[in-house]
Amino acid sequence: MRKQIAWLWENMDAPYRRRHVIALCVCALTCLMLLVNPALSRRLIDDVIVARNPEPLLSILAVMLAVKLGREGLRYMMVIFLETDSQNVIFNLRRRLFEKMQYNDMRFFDGHRTGDLMTRMSADLDWCRHFLSYIDYRIIDAVCTFLFATVYLTLVNWKLTLLLIVITPVLLMITKFFSKHVRPRFVFMREKLSEMNTAAQENIAGNRVVKAFAREEYEKERFEEKNRAFMESHLRINKLWLTFFPMIELLVNAIQLVTVFVGGLFIIGGELTPGELAVFTGLSWAVSNPMRELGNLINDLQRFSTSAAKVMELHYGRPEIVDSAEAADHGRMRGEIAFDHVSFRIDDKPILTDVTFSVQAGQTVAVMGPTGGGKTTLIHLLARFYDVSEGEIRVDGCDVRQWKLKQLRGGIGTATQDVFLFSDTVEGNVAFGNQELTLEEVKDFARRADAAEFIDKLPEGYDTIIGERGVGLSGGQRQRIALARALAVRPSILVMDDTTSAVDSETEQYIQEQLRNLPFACTKFIIAQRISSMRDADLILVLQDGRITEQGTHRELLARRGYYWQTYCLQYGIPME
């Protein structure tokens, strides 16, 4: 837990640190002020009521009222400081975590569920805020109240005070036992919360698939299972707390009984005055209440510790794919691509093996092959989403590991079959990679992607808000907007991963004609299954089981009568003899 608290402190900016320390000092001061009114009550009883001397009555009451108002005013200021600072700290921390996530590599997102990341960015961070705004000041409040009250009561009557605090070690033993057993349960509950959020996120994101397969009942049962597991984990913690809480209450009530019973005996024996007994009865809660709160605070501390550990894992995570120290600045990318004996493995599983080919700037390379052959992996390696296991990929004659990531990826425009469109206007989606585009330029790129006609028919044209993943658009319409988005960055390398798979042949032919007449130089990297999409390419690759089994032009591959020729015959209805 020390690591989590130290990490949170390190991530507080200096002004918030100072204000937080001031707020905690104010908390300690108000705990000390708690002793004033019981001390005045002692005078009120012994010097006014018992002595029947009304003269100091009004002055004592006035001081008691002033102390009460002053203490409440300071507490109000303290809470305002803590709440304001905790919100600012978490705002800055959430911003920094989001910035870190932007630069995490593909392996990070491959290994983390979306629901889990959302839980870390919301519920887990909120527990960090709760620590700063409530838990730490309540700990200071409980400790200071107990210490100040104990010291003062000892000065009044050490014997009675000793009887009051003798129960403390028993309370500490019970608390330690509770803390030891509750932490693993909070870790388990946190995992169940993450699983439940992941199930909900996947269902919402895949709602059309659920409806298409009429799997609503299955999804209800699946979420019910996750929801019940989270509920049961929560109940197990509550049951443990309910086992622990009566012990604390019993010991706390014992303190109050000791105060009344033994204090009465001391008055009879002349060892205590009525005013001093009033001090003990008035401050017995200051000894017992911190013990009562100790269980709740440990409960909250364990939840904070569990959540903060998850956030720290995200905070201290470092991407594997970063700019190398030797990475140099380059001018505009020309678009020359060379794969030199490239192999790629994930957990010792080969994905690509000894892939070698090259294309000149402005040429077109097309890749086809069966599903799972490694076609999309070529794109990921080219944009350096992953690093090769062996070999080298060069762009403009320079290893991609010697390019700065922003410059490398900025020169590559990508349009994929699985299109993601943001909840923004059509114009905003097209201009996502180039915010300086004018509306006329956006329209021009939409026209080249054959998207202008249907966009003009939308309710508000280019100002129409389209939903997440392009809700409200057909598959072909989403693909064409994605292609326009890729073209809008004026890339030196245009990657099309089955981009025209959902459009008709006439639209595909129009798009191909537009791609041949782009107003900027561009090397095209096409992944497709249609022969019509790649027959005019300067180089066609057939990728099977991670290896290039055929390469050449359309005519050369037909002459070889291999996989490419078989696909050609199947698509054009030509008998294979």
Image (cartoon, rainbow, N blue to C red):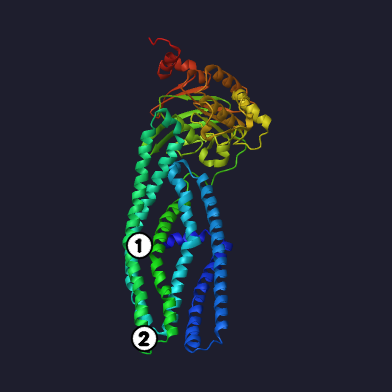
Front-lying residue, 461 or 41: 41
Q: Position of residue 157 (x, y in %)?
A: 40, 85
Q: Position of residue 572 (x, y in %)?
A: 45, 12
Task: Please name the residue shown 46% across and 39% down the image.
Answer: 386
Question: Label for residue 179?
Answer: 1
Q: Position of residue 535 (x, y in %)?
A: 51, 18
Marked residue nearer the N-terminal end (1 or 2): 1
Task: Please name the residue shown 34% across and 66% down the image.
Answer: 175
Front-lying residue, 111 or 525: 111
SS type, badge 1? helix
Choose mark 1 or mark 2, whichever is in front.
Answer: 2
- In the rendered structure, the answer to whether residue 249 lies left or right of residue 338 reads left
Question: Label for residue 354?
Answer: none
The residue tagged 2 is 266
Mark-to-mark CA distance, 1 and 2: 38 Å
Amino acid at circle 1 = Ser
Give the answer, above or below, for where 138 lies relative to 219.
below
Give the answer, above or below, for where 497 lies relative to 35.
above
Residue 442 in view (yes/no):
yes
Is the C-beta separation of discs 1 and 2 under 8 Å?
no
Front-lying residue, 563 or 106: 106
Residue 348 in view (yes/no):
no
Task: Please name the residue shown 33% across and 65% down the image.
Answer: 246
Image quarter where the C terminus lies is: top left
Amino acid at circle 2 = Phe
SS type, badge 2? helix
Q: Position of residue 452 (x, y in %)?
A: 62, 25
